[in-house]
């Protein structure tokens, strides 16, 4: 699935963000009218007109022509069209994986970063984000906020969360952040004070010690900041999730990390252990990071058991069922965004294909050497949950011990 | 941007120790433990290296000790933040001050249990009943407790013999509760239960706690009553209460007597047969009638521990084969060993729960720091009486010098023997027990039965946990209070 | 059985703690011999308790308590700080950086 296309823009003097309208709508000023008919459209009042064709109409409204590959776009989806004719899909109603890419800046530089940061000042984007939130359907169940590092926008980050609270009160927000700036207590306090009804911060932690974590994220002091950040967020009632990327540097002490999480962050609503995405900076560090997932199943099982037995909610992301230890199937989720998922040829006759999350598109050339089709009847029949939505936060282990000796 | 090498992030500062205690566990291993309950095994050589600052910073044991706060090697605030947060969590049983309020509504009882802690009187001695006025005054004090959630436990003698008082306490407490959440428990032998009482319990969500010492031959021998049918009556009562209130609204406790010692399996089997998911293997307390009849019903701590271990083995076996049943004392110790959470168990905490965790209002209005100190008063030693509901204010009672001294003496860090013990974070103190058995609120640890029991059990559980992966899984299911497989987990 | 203990190696506090462990099995008496030495008299309560084993065990326990004293010397102040901080609302350590505003970022966390 392509998420962008290039067309020929006329009268587009700045980036115009609007909803797709395949038929006539009332809120014309917020809509990009999709018009593939050769006849001249009645375009008055629309934000713009988008067409597949190389039309030659002369109309007063911003137009982008020759846009191909975006025919899947439906009413209510949101696109951004810039003066160069670049059309970007920002939001699709039919997708469960919509997100706001807050910024491309980051204060970490993870060895395996799949969204390599750029040293630019893109703080102006915040206006686009506010506009996007204004246009998103309030019935949207979940929305992600990613980057780079979203909290680098400081107060603007907080304002955007608040804006989501007012415009999209029933949309669950899942923010991916390194959590480091929550070292400053007041920042955590302010986020808590917004009182968003369904906000989860997904924060990575890669080791139980500072050496390894700081090295992996390439930032001095990051471990200390993240640990304190997690505690500050809990102090002010912000729900957190802890994420771990599985690779050769995190696997050796994975079980110890699991224990560290269970004992120090029992308030974490969820822990996600994630297969590594083969995209971005990882290729510069491949020899240090790559490990065939088939070779880390023992460590993964030990870590998962450690967390689950302590009563924590655990999910395994980006694992292929044919490689995943059988005892871990109940924890596997179909986690890869729909537009990034692929299956291999081997998968065509796999009886577990529907339950399996497949692979990252980026894994086409580098993936486990042990992918193979599973025959029907060779694996537990009753289906575990393959729901991939952000789990509902739950309190930590309940107390059931008695008060006294009588 | 370029990537920085691993060496850049490695620390080169020499490490310093964080506070911890140790125990020479066996010939091969030492156990180290710190105030927040983190523990691990080291070889004796590793322990010496640790203290002499000779541990290799690249070794796994170094990293294990660092992440569990036994050493630190930078200015990072992380270990300090985690230590203070976890210390506070472990001591959070102190929040809200007195949470457990025990009402002795009557000394009357028709049973004559050998180990009874109450100077019970026969059922016709009405003057040993708590009066309406006393109950009201006591409730005034109860509601002064700062805790958001409190538990009112009504016992006796046999409380159902003074059911009017039970009804009054529950009704008045609920009416005056305000924003407090109140849990009610009635501790009864169920022999006198009626449909009216059951109906009242159902309406008011009262939980029932009863005694089941084992199969009839043990239970009836321990707990004589006219007709010698305690077991049958208790079972009947349990059935009736379960039918009206729900299966889980009845809990049972057992008391171990000399007779029990030879029958751990039969006792556990009885609990399984009756559908209980928890059994609390309690030793005799050295008080009241138990003290008087030591020769016939008494036994040594060693004998109790042998019984306990046999019962625990059997319980683990049952769990292994798919029957979920928890041993409650082990569950408490394991929660302390395996999680950062507190346990609200007042009989094993430091500072002790006397008065500050639990308090007793006797039928005559006298207020005591614990059930045991009430018993001492019945044996003419009233030094642990805190006051009387008719005469003394809340402040006079709960800020009394008696209570203050009692609690101060119970802090384990100030008790010789306890202060250096590696198991300190998992254990607790019981100053009244010490006073009763050794003549001083401060124990003589090397000869203390309290120490012997707890030290042995904690060590035994750690040992099992370390060497038996199946026991480990079962222990975790006890800590979570859910059978293996009931919650999301590795099968 | 009388053991001679060099008090320049084993301070009095250490000897007391070690001896306390044995008070279940022995009667214990201390005597000072001179400025550097003291005598520890251990009389078994039970005749069957072997004196040689007892003295060996005592020596080991003495060593352990020396180790504990060393740990305590290095860590008591920190322990007090941890306990005090656990129960104190205000920050006892210098936490100015943690209490700063995210916009000021004195620690430079936001540095790209």
Image (cartoon, coloured by chain):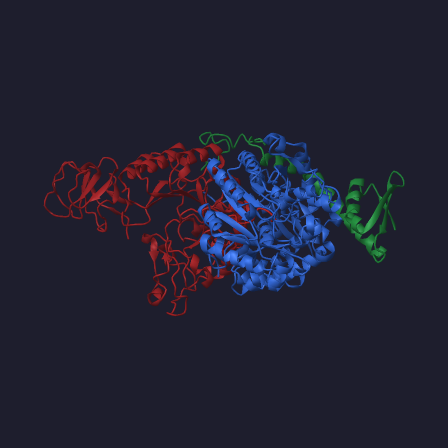
In front: B350, or A302?
A: B350
Side (left or right) of A80 relative to B172: left
Q: Residue at x 36, y 50 (%)?
A: A389
The answer to whether residue A207 shows anywhere in this view is: no
The answer to whether residue C95 shows anywhere in this view is: yes
Q: Residue at x 23, y 48 (%)?
A: A73
Specify the quadrant that holds the N terminus of chain B.
top left
The image shows residue A138 at horizontal and vertical percentages of: 28, 42
Is the residue A379 above or below the residue C41 in the image? below
In front: B282, or B451?
A: B282
Instruction: Report the residue that reaches farthest toward the left.
Output: A39
Chain B: drawing colour:
blue
Is the residue B146 above or below the residue A298 in the image? above
Side (left or right) of C103 relative to B225: left
The image shows residue B199 at horizontal and vertical percentages of: 45, 49
Q: Which chain is green?
A: C
Q: Which chain is red?
A: A
The image shows residue B213 at horizontal and vertical percentages of: 61, 58
Instruction: Report the residue that reaches farthest toward the front.
Output: B124
Side (left or right) of C12 relative to B219: right
Q: Residue at x 21, y 47 (%)?
A: A67
In front: B224, or C91?
A: B224
Q: How many marks?
A: 0
In front: B362, or B53?
A: B362
The image shows residue A170 at horizontal and vertical percentages of: 32, 42
């Amino acid at each position: 699935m392509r998420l962008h296309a290039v067309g020929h823009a006329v009268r587009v003097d700045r980036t115009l963000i609007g909803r797709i309208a395949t038929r006539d709508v009332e809120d014309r000023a917020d809509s990009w009218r999709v018009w593939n008919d050769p006849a001249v459209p009645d375009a008055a009042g629309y934000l713009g007109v988008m067409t597949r064709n190389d039309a030659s109409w002369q109309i007063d409204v911003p137009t982008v022509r020759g846009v191909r590959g975006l025919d899947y776009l439906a009413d209510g989806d949101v696109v951004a069209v810039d003066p160069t004719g670049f059309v970007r899909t920002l939001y699709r109603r039919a997708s469960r994986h919509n997100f706001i890419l807050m910024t491309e800046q980051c204060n970490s530089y993870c060895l395996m970063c799949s969204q390599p940061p750029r040293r630019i000042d893109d703080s102006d984007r915040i206006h686009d984000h506010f506009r996007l939130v204004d246009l998103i359907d309030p019935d949207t169940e979940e929305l992600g906020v990613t980057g780079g590092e979203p909290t680098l926008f400081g107060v603007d980050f907080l304002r955007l969360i608040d804006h989501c609270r007012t415009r999209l009160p029933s949309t669950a927000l899942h923010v991916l952040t390194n959590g480091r700036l929550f070292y400053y207590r007041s920042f955590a306090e302010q986020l808590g004070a917004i009182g968003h009804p369904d906000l989860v911060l997904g924060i990575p932690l890669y080791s139980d010690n500072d050496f390894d974590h700081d090295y992996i994220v390439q930032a001095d002091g990051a471990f200390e900041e993240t640990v304190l950040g997690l505690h500050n967020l809990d102090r002010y009632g912000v729900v957190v999730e802890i994420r771990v990327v599985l690779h050769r540097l995190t696997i050796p002490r994975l079980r110890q990390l699991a224990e560290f999480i269970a004992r120090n962050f029992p308030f974490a609503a969820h822990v996600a252990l994630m297969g590594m995405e083969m995209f971005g900076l990882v290729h510069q560090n491949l020899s240090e990071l790559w490990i065939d997932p088939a070779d880390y199943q023992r460590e993964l099982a030990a870590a998962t058991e450690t967390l689950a037995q302590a009563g924590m909610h655990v999910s395994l992301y980006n694992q292929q069922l044919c490689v995943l230890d059988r005892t871990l199937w109940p924890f596997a989720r179909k986690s890869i965004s729909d537009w990034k998922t692929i299956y291999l040829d081997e998968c065509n006759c796999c009886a577990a294909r529907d339950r399996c999350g497949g692979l990252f598109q980026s894994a086409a050339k580098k993936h486990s050497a042990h992918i193979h089709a599973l025959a029907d009847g060779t694996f537990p029949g009753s289906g575990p949950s393959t729901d991939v939505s952000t789990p509902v936060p739950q309190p930590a282990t309940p107390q059931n011990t008695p008060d006294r000796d009588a | 941007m370029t990537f920085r090498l691993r060496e850049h992030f490695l620390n080169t500062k020499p490490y310093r120790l964080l506070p911890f205690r140790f125990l020479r566990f066996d010939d091969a291993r030492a156990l180290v433990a710190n105030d927040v309950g983190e523990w691990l095994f080291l070889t004796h050589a590793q322990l010496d290296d640790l203290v002499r600052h000779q541990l290799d910073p690249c070794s796994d044991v170094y990293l294990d000790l660092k992440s569990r706060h036994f050493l630190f090697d930078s200015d990072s605030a992380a270990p300090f933040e985690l230590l203070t947060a976890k210390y506070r969590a472990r001591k959070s049983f102190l929040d809200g001050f007195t949470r457990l309020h025990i009402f002795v509504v009557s000394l009357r009882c028709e049973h004559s249990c050998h180990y009874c802690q109450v100077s019970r009187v026969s059922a016709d001695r009405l003057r040993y009943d708590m009066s309406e006025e006393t109950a009201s005054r006591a409730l005034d004090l109860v509601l002064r407790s700062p805790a958001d959630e409190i538990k009112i436990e009504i016992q006796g003698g046999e409380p159902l013999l003074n059911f009017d008082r039970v009804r009054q306490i529950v009704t008045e407490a609920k009416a005056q509760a305000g924003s407090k959440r109140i849990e009610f428990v009635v501790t009864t032998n169920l022999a006198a239960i009626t449909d009216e009482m059951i109906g009242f319990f159902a309406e008011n969500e009262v939980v029932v706690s009863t005694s089941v010492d084992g199969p009839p031959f043990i239970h009836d021998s321990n707990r004589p009553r006219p007709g010698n049918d305690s077991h049958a009556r208790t079972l009947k009562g349990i059935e009736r209460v379960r039918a009206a209130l729900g299966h889980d609204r009845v809990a049972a406790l057992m008391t171990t007597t000399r007779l029990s010692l030879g029958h751990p399996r039969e006792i556990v089997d009885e609990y399984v047969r009756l559908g209980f998911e928890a059994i609390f293997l309690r030793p005799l307390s050295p008080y009241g009638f138990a003290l008087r009849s030591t020769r016939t019903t008494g036994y040594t701590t060693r004998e109790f521990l042998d019984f306990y271990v046999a019962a625990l083995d059997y319980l683990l076996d049952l769990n292994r084969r798919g029957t979920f049943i928890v041993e409650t004392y082990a569950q408490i110790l394991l929660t302390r060993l395996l999680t950062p959470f507190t346990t609200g168990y007042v009989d094993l905490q430091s500072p002790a729960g006397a008065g500050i965790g639990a308090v007793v209002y006797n039928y005559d209005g006298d207020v005591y720091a614990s059930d045991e100190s009430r018993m001492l008063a019945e044996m003419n030693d009233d030094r642990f009486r805190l006051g009387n509901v008719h005469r003394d204010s809340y402040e006079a009672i709960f800020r009394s010098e008696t209570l203050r001294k009692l609690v101060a003496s119970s802090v384990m860090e100030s008790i010789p023997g306890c202060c250096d013990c590696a198991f300190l974070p998992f254990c607790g103190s019981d100053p009244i027990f010490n006073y009763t058995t050794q003549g001083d609120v401060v124990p003589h640890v090397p000869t203390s039965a309290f120490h012997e029991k707890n030290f042995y059990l904690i060590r035994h559980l750690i040992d099992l946990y370390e060497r038996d992966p199946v026991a480990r899984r079962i222990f975790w299911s006890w800590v979570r209070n859910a059978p293996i497989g009931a919650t999301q987990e590795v099968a | 059985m009388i053991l001679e203990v060099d008090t320049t190696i084993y301070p009095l506090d250490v000897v007391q703690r070690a001896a306390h462990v044995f008070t279940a099995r022995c009667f214990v008496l201390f005597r000072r011999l001179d400025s550097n030495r003291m005598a520890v008299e251990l009389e078994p309560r039970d005749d069957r308790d072997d004196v040689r084993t007892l003295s060996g065990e005592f020596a080991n326990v003495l060593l352990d308590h020396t180790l504990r004293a060393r740990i305590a010397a290095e860590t008591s102040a920190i322990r007090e700080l941890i306990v005090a901080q656990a129960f104190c609302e205000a920050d006892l350590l210098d936490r100015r950086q943690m209490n700063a505003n995210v916009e000021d970022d004195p620690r430079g966390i936001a540095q790209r």
